[in-house]
């Protein structure tokens, strides 16, 4: 955005690109889909993830409070680990002459490319206190063959 003077008064001159940027004239961007949806509570909710590595294994921790073990689905296909969950809740309440019915549906899916030195078939999963912990053991490193001298006969 730049300023244009006309008859002694300063007006902001808006360009088309200004409408795609945030905070034009103090208003939210028109095409900030993620920001606009999150303000309405409609944005996709993905759990936060921590990935750590040591000499023996990789560890993936997903923050997914409010879920139960039965809500998760963990799959490995073509060296891709996919963690998904879905939870449906429904409440019905009848008192006197009124009836209240509420329902909600939440789901997410996260995928991770497995490192080549991990055992995709030996993944251990544990869910406790809202944290899903996946442990991926590493394959044993193949050591180079020792140098061998060959005698000439």
Image: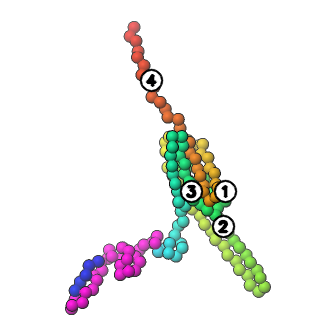
How dense is the environment of label 3, judged by Cα within 10 Å: few (below 14), some, or many (20 and up)? some
**Mark 2 lies on residue:** 88
The x, y position of residue 2, in whole percent, is 26, 79
The x, y position of residue 87, in whole percent, is 64, 64
Tag shown at residue 136: none
Residue 7 covered by magenta stretch? yes
The x, y position of residue 22, in whole percent, is 38, 74
**Mark 1 lies on residue:** 69
Kind of element beneath mark 2: strand
Q: Which residue appears at 40% of the width and 17% of the height?
A: 149
How dense is the environment of label 2, judged by Cα within 10 Å: few (below 14), some, or many (20 and up)? few
**C-alpha distance separating marks 4 and 2:** 58 Å
Q: Which residue is outermost to the bottom?
A: 7
Which label lies toward us, 4 or 2?
Answer: 4
Q: Which of the two labelled residues, at mark 2 and mark 1, occupies the earlier sequence position?
A: 1
**Mark 3 lies on residue:** 62
Quarter of the image with the N terminus in it: bottom left
Which label lies toward us, 2 or 1?
Answer: 1
In the rendered image, the vertical position of residue 57 relative to residue 27, given as above or below: above
Decide which of 69, 90 is in the foreground and name it.
69
**Mark 4 lies on residue:** 146
Asked which colour scheme the image uses, the reply is rainbow
Does the rendering let one see residue 71?
Answer: no
* Span shown in magenta: 6-35
Q: Which of the two labelled residues, at mark 4 and mark 2, occupies the earlier sequence position?
A: 2
């Amino acid at each position: 955005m730049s300023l244009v003077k006309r008859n002694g008064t300063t007006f902001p001159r808006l360009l088309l690109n200004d409408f795609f940027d945030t905070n034009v004239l103090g208003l939210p961007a028109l095409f900030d889909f993620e920001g606009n949806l999150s303000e309405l509570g409609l944005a996709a909710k993905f759990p936060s993830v921590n990935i750590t590595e040591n000499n023996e294994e990789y560890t993936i921790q997903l923050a997914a409070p409010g879920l139960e073990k039965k809500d998760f689905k963990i799959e490995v296909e073509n060296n891709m680990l996919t963690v998904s969950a879905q939870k449906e809740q429904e409440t019905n309440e009848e008192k006197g002459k009124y009836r209240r019915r509420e329902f909600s549906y939440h789901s997410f899916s996260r995928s991770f490319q497995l490192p080549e030195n991990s055992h995709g078939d030996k993944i251990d999963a544990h869910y406790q206190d809202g944290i899903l912990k996946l442990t991926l053991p590493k394959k044993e490193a193949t050591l180079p063959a020792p140098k061998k001298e060959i005698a000439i006969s």
